[in-house]
Image (spheres, rainbow, N blue to C red):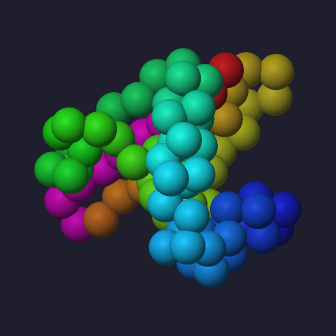
């Protein structure tokens, strides 16, 4: 619930008002990740980490392995993005 309230709701309410700040946050999140894999066509140039993490949280596709990693999985019928943090 904490991730939902911190990621899903703000993205919906303020991303259009603060696009520069969201872009900066997206870059910082990208630096922190330990691995990524995406088949989304929109990710060919640059992965939108905030969007994929937000979608993973909103659809309950987050897995935790204590003392190891957190994995966010965003997928639709034909595309998938997995972002892992150690």
Instruction: Give me the residue at 68% from left, 70% from top.
Output: 10
Query: Quick one: 60 or 83, which is closer to the camera?
Result: 83
The quarter of the picture where residue 8 lies is bottom right
Q: Is residue 17 left or right of residue 8?
A: left
| Residue 4 visible in the displayed image | yes
Instruction: Return the residue found at the far bottom.
Output: 13
In the picture shown, does residue 43 fall above or below 52?
A: above
Q: Is residue 17 left or right of residue 5?
A: left
For the record, the magenta segment spans 77-83
Position of residue 85 measured from the top left corner of the image (x, y, whole percent): 62, 27
Instruction: Give me the residue at 20% from left, 37% from top.
Output: 45
Instruction: Give me the residue at 55% from left, 73% from top.
Output: 17
Please check the rendered image and state whether residue 63 is part of the magenta-colored stretch, yes or no: no
Query: Quick one: 17 or 73, which is closer to the camera?
Result: 17
Position of residue 14 measured from the top left corner of the image (x, y, whole percent): 61, 74
The quarter of the picture where residue 39 lies is top left
In the picture shown, does residue 40 fall above or below 14?
A: above
Please check the rendered image and state whether residue 79 is part of the magenta-colored stretch, yes or no: yes
User: Quadrant location of the N terminus?
Assistant: bottom right
Position of residue 27 measured from the top left corner of the image (x, y, whole percent): 50, 34
């Amino acid at each position: 619930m904490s991730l939902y309230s911190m990621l899903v709701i703000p993205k919906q309410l303020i991303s259009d008002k603060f696009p520069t700040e969201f872009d900066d946050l997206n870059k910082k999140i990208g630096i922190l990740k330990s691995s990524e894999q995406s088949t989304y066509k929109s990710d060919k140039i640059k992965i939108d980490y905030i969007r994929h993490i937000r979608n993973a949280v909103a659809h309950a596709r987050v897995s935790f392995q204590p003392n190891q990693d957190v994995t966010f999985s965003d997928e639709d019928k034909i595309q998938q993005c997995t972002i892992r943090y150690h």
